[in-house]
Image (cartoon, rainbow, N blue to C red):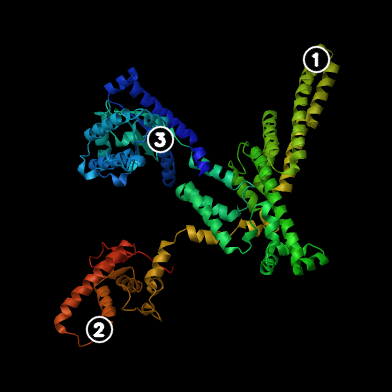
Amino acid sequence: QQIQEDLNKQLLENLMSFLSRSHSDFQEKTTEWTCRMKFREIPTAALVLGVNVTDHDLTFRGLSDVLQDNITPYVALLEAKDCPGIKNLMQKLMGQLMNCDIDVDSLEDEDCVQVSQNRIRCSMSSLTSWYESVKKKRDSETPSKKRNSSSRHWQSPPIVVIFKDMESFTTKVLQDFIVISSQHIHELPLVLIFGIATSPMIIHRLLPHSVSSLLCIELFQSLSCKEHLSTIIDKLLLTSRFPFKLGEKVLQVLINIFLYHDFSVQNFIKGFQLCIVEHFYSQPLSVLCCQVADIKKRAYSLSHDQCENVRRLPSFRRYVEKQESGKQVALLTNDSFLKEETEKLLEDLHVYHENYVSILRCLHVFTSSLPKYPLGKQIRELHCVCLENRVWETEEYESSLQLARMLNKTDLVTMLQQCVEILMSSSGKEFDKTAEKFKEFLTQFQNLEAEASQERDVSVSSQKELQKKTDLYHLKKTLLELKESRRSKKLTKFEMLRFQVVAYIDSLVRKYLVPADDRTLHEIVYFNTATVLRGHLNAAPRTALHMALNNPHWYLKNEALKCDGGGISNKAPDICIVYKLHLECGRLINLVDWLEAFSTVVMAAEEPNADAASSDQVDDTIHARFIRAVSELELLGFIKPSKQKTDHVARLTWGGC
């Protein structure tokens, strides 16, 4: 939440500045405001937030809180579902504004009278009168109260109306509200904020020119949802502050849902929280997933059963197999020795994470500057590749090295400087020598510049000497020497130094970017069960419906509805009976035959000598129940009316679930 507030900080500051300009014009009655009033223009902010609609609520809540804390208490948040008509919009608007006017400290005052919304005529004139009365009340307050209120709010606070989902509002509602508001703008400091998910052009598509010309629009663009996600991953996952980590497959599932479904950062965070809950619930050794300061205490508090769980971990078994025989026996039989070794291995894992993050950032500095982005432009893409396998064995990595060997000196110097900053800010203790090595490379590049200027002077003098040699023999000899030197094509000092830099980066990658699966006890801190996460997040509605309709006793907790041998219970809900009967039919289902089969199942429990007088009534009741069940089945998408035959319906689902 703090990260997202920081990301939206610049946007909120720009909106505050916009409101300040609009409001100051109204307060001071400047020439600009008078000119705007002449054309009845309403200050309007078009806030483009992107298609990640589920994240908009957090942004609007933050915007509303900032406005109410610093500028005005009169903020109304309107949604299209609550405003089908202009009357509903005005009721919602005035209701929210008047609730804002009620002060907590004055609720018990005798002068405070709570007026219900129904007793107020909801119109722009009523809103204007209400604002004037509130303004006079604020002006007549005692100096102490006025000082307290003015410290937070402006003297004549504007009324801010936020349309959270502008695309969903009907054109007529927007037009009527804007036209009515423009007629009162000279006496009411109204400011509109349009929340837009698609494009600012939607304003001109929804509103004709005669209406849009009444708006003084300023455009505001939030950061893209991909930038939000990259920052979230950078601050939450690519850090050693938090011991819990996501495995490659799990992270890929969350990123795929983000990229191919909703672009929602909030849903990504919910998936991340679900991973935390699932890991600490299903992993018996998750008690060891803690900060490095708590590792020793928790490792020595392991019970015998927990020690056995450590011994069963696949990574620990591989580790034991690599040890000498005496240590193997101690690890498998001595709990105290195992606890000491567990503490050491977990601390090594923590150091591995610190080193991994630093070198990953350095590698990203190089790969993100390459022209074709073989390993991806975002650091999350590079992180997924490094988690999946040994990155130096991939073709993308080899092509990245080849491109890096063709970088110019300016790019290389800039990258080395960024790497030095990353390593200097890292908490890893092993990178002092690495940072010194990068600084040494920078010094060598600076020395090359001085040598290059001297070489240029020498080449110029040699060309002048070549021009002086008029003898044909000496001229031919010199040209042959130049040709031979070009053919051998010796590497220049810059090219040799560039190869050294790339080779050194490659050595760091091979040393520190080993996949987490190769580390001992990685199961304790990494959540790798992608199938469980996919089952929680990727809904399978048809499978759930099939299970519910085919086995109602599981959901209704009623064993009387259970049928063995594929039979159909007459006590089951009508829709379950109809669903099971439709599974026995072909592509087209005859409604008459279907009704007869339904009636047979339902009447199976009836006594054979039932009263004949009530037979018609029973038939009508069964007929009505059948029609309702078929309608429900059509609503769920299992059948549809057929155009081929009027007394048939078409079946839409096939195969098992």
For disc 1, the marked residue is: 461
Instruction: Find numbered disc 3 in the image and state the secondary structure of the residue it sits on.
Output: helix
Q: Nearer the viewer, mark 2 or mark 1?
A: 2
Tell me where residue 130 appears, x and y as whole percent: 25, 34
Between the residue at mark 2 and the residue at mark 1, the CA separation in whole angstroms equals 117 Å
Q: Nearer the viewer, residue 99 or 417?
A: 99
- Give the amino acid type for the residue marked by disc 2 in the picture: Glu
Under circle 1, the secondary element is: helix
Question: Residue 67, labelled with which disc?
Answer: 3
Q: Is residue 353 visible?
A: yes
Question: Which tag, 3 or 1, sits closer to the chain's start?
Answer: 3
Above or below, 309 relative to 373: below
Q: Residues within 10 Å of mark 2 (few under 14, many from 20)?
A: few
Mark pair 3, 1: CA separation: 71 Å
Quarter of the rendering containing residue 164: top left
Where residue 608 appears, as percent x and y from the top left, is 22, 87
Q: Amino acid at mark 1?
A: Ser
- The x, y position of residue 639, in whole percent, is 32, 64
Query: Quick one: label 3, few (<14), some, or many (20+) residues within 10 Å?
Result: many
Going by the image, does 367 lie left or right of 450? Answer: left
Q: Residue at x 53, y 42 (%)?
A: 3
Helix, strand or loop at mark 2: loop
> In the figure, 74 relative to 610: above or below?
above
Relative to 222, residue 282 above or below = below
Q: Which residue is labeled 2 in the image?
A: 606
